[in-house]
Image (cartoon, grey):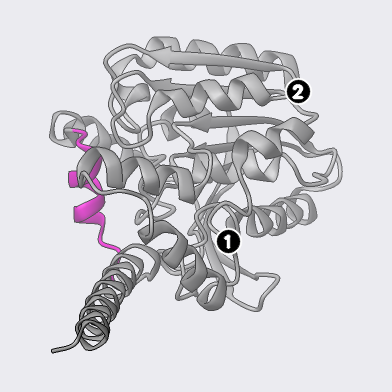
Amino acid sequence: MGKEAFLMSKLGKMTALAGILATAQIGEAVYFYRRTMKRNNAKVERTIKMAGTDWNQYMELIQARKESLLAQPHKEISIQSEDGLKLHATYFPGKEHKKVVICFHGYTSHGMSDFIGISDYYRKRGYSMLHPDARAHGKSEGEYIGFGCLDRKDALRWIHWVIKQCGEDVQILLHGISMGGATVLMASGLKLPEQVKGIVSDCGFTSPKEVFTHVLHSMYHLPAYPLIPITDWINQKKAGYGMDECNAKREVRKANIPILLIHGDADTFVPSKMCEEIYKNCASQKTKLIVKGAAHAESYYKDMEAYEQALNKLIDKVID
């Protein structure tokens, strides 16, 4: 074989190998995308396992509060999203019809799950509570998960529903956990109605891109490149948004209402450094509570007294 033929053969093999590797990487990205971003493949059991929080120790309390909450008068409601999806929520009218908290749940959860424990806090204070199912979760329509980027616009629709339901003089608090925490922080960058008085974000992340990068590094020991760029491209085509298109640490630079940030320092799923980044960038009045030893979404149960005191301080400032 001549030198030229040898080089051409070598080049052909390298090109073929590069093609195989590229195909494998694309296949890996598609697999990751489907199990993470599509509702039928994103499983709550997998999320709980990845988050690492031991919920069994709190189940007796959660179950008791769930029974108590469901014994209260409530109704199922629905609205339409900006892009035509039917969104579902459960509404609990409290004694204080002019004081409403809208509760935004986390990834792969649903409206009547993440706020069962803390519902006791709001109920005792007479608050009406709205528990929406995020798009592609629970009874809400949608195939692709919004990770706060799309959900913040849905949140605005729920805010307007509350104002129409309760009147122009209603006072609204937004409270989110995990993906819901990211949702309310991302919503802070929108032009919110004056009825929204405060925001509480519990273990919210900065953006889907940054939290996925963290999970790939810490749990799967994989590099973000090229998996994240490929996934981002797929998501823009399928779901219509980029994975860092909306970032909570950028959105809070436009915030003009008080924000309370809560995070557990033992959270390995959404690291507390994201809370610090958001706090540093927040332009509005801000406070934070870092709960020692709390894993993902565990802060309320780990230190209920500190959590409720932090809520009291915020609410006393912003709600009449």
- For the stretch drawn in magenta, the main secondary structure is helix
Q: Please give the name of the residue rendered at 33% of the width and 68% of the height, measured from the top-left corner.
A: 29
Is the residue 18 above or below the residue 186 in the image? Answer: below
What SS does tag 1 mark? Answer: loop
Mark closest to the chain's N terminus, 1 or 2: 1
Other-residue count near label 1 (Cα within 10 Å), few / some / many at <14 / 14–19 / ≥20: some
Other-residue count near label 2 (Cα within 10 Å), few / some / many at <14 / 14–19 / ≥20: some
Magenta segment, which residues?
Answer: 41-53
Q: Please give the name of the residue rendered at 70% of the width and 70% of the height, measured from the top-left corner.
A: 82
Q: Is residue 201 left or right of residue 223?
A: right
- The part of the image, by quadrant, that contains residue 294 is top left
What SS does tag 2 mark? Answer: loop
Q: Amino acid at mark 1?
A: Gly
Where does residue 140 sit, x and y in percent of width and height? 49, 69
Q: Please give the name of the residue rendered at 25% of the width and 37% of the height, measured from the top-left corner.
A: 218
* Placement of the C terminus among the 4 image quadrants: top right
Q: How many marks?
A: 2
Q: Is residue 205 left or right of residue 59?
A: right
Q: Which numbered marker is on residue 284?
A: 2
Where does residue 52 sit, x and y in percent of width and height? 19, 36
Considering depth in this image, is 103 or 213 the residue closer to the camera?
213
Does the magenta-highlighted stretch encompass residue 43?
Answer: yes
Q: Which numbered marker is on residue 242?
A: 1
